[in-house]
Amino acid sequence: MSIQFATKARRGMAAASIAAGLALGVAGCSGGGDDKKPETSASATTDKESDPSAQQGTDESLAELKGEGGLILVVTSATRDAGGFVTVSGEIKNDGAEGARIPIQTRGNETEIMKHGVSLGGATLVDPASRKRYYVLRDTDGRPLTTTGMPRIKPGASVPVFMQFPAPSAETAEVTFQLPTFASASIEISA
């Protein structure tokens, strides 16, 4: 199952690269490139919800969102990419006593996304300052640029996940992350 996930994740990342190229082509040259972007650490997170259980090398999380049936989405990063995207990464853990599946509602209710099966396509980022909502990006076939085809999660196990969104304005550092059937939370975007 991890090979299947890795293959799908690679497809999603390849689609994101293609979408980034298309977005850059549509947007045209905006002058200046990387000359104003300082190198920063992707671990610019707060310690308010750090987890000492060093899973996969990360001790900190941006947020923990409780879902149905003992599922918890742990958001570990929200990184602004050079191509104009924000990639939200983390893991969905099963803290319940029985195996659990990701609820079908997490894919959202858009017809184009629904026909591609279980995904996290219903996720959104909300910029409260500018009153804008950002939906998960899609490739040219309408597939969401998120983790898809997630397996049943055994008790105590977790599955790595990612979602890509259009990036809010450069001045926006904090957004509200929402995923159907999970609680909402404010997360900080790192450069």
Image (spheres, grey):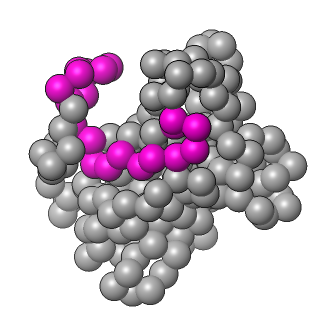
Whether residue 140 sits left or right of residue 176 in the image: it is right
Residue in view at x 31 percent, y 59 percent: 187
Which of 120/81 is in front? 120
In magenta segment, residue 102: no
Residue at the limit of the structure toward the front, as seen here: 97
Residue 153 lies, in percent from the top left, at: 59, 23
User: Magenta span has 57?
Assistant: yes
Residue 179, x across and y down, in percent: 55, 56
The relative height of residue 157 versus residue 32 in the rendered view (above or below) is: above
- As drawn, 95 above or below 109: above
For the point 27% across and 41% down, the residue is 61
On the question of residue 28 being in view, the answer is: no
Give 170 or 47, whichever is nearer the viewer. 47
Q: Is residue 88 left or right of residue 179?
A: left
Q: What residue is rendered at 12% in x and 45% in y?
A: 47
Q: Position of residue 140 (x, y in %)?
A: 76, 53
Q: Which residues are magenta?
A: 52-71
